[in-house]
Amino acid sequence: MEEKKRGLHSLYLEDRNRMVVTDVKDVENFNEETILLTIGGGGLVIKGQKLHIQKLDLEEGKVIIDGRIQSAVYTEKRDASEGGFLKKLLK
């Protein structure tokens, strides 16, 4: 059985209006302006306007986001004892 590699992901941005992210473990939070993803190796904060999660498949580890994407910022991996990256981000 082949072991799945962790932390290898891809981020594809098409014309600032559509983003595909792989190796997604969870969606921590989302609204029309911010989407917080847990990916292998840390977190990803996506900011924009009128953001919408078009497709989410955690089994495949893939999310497709539509809307006006303005930024994508990586966050560091946190230990569970420290709380999620959302807790640290909102302090």
Image (spheres, rainbow, N blue to C red):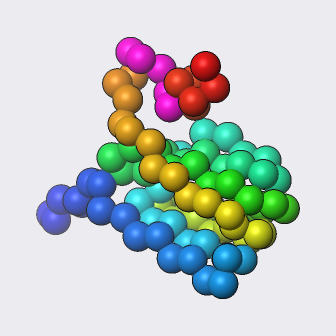
| Residue 47 visible within the image | yes
In front: 24, or 32? 32
The reply to whether the magenta stretch includes residue 60 is no
Residue sitting at x 74%, y 59%: 48
Query: Which picture quadrant has residue 46?
Result: bottom right
Q: Position of residue 13 (x, y in %)?
A: 57, 77
Residue at 24% x, 60% y: name it. Answer: 4
Question: Which of the 4 image quarters holds residue 91?
Answer: top right
Residue 54 lies in what quarter of the image? bottom right
Residue positioned 30% across, 55% down in the render: 7
Residue 6 shown left or right of residue 26 in the figure = left
Give residue 38's position: percent from left, percent from top.
48, 45
Nearer to me, 64 or 45: 45
Relative to 46, 74 lies left or right? left
Write the start and end of the magenta stretch as one range.
81-85
Q: Looking at the picture, does residue 5 appear above or below residue 35?
A: below
State yes or no: residue 82 in magenta: yes
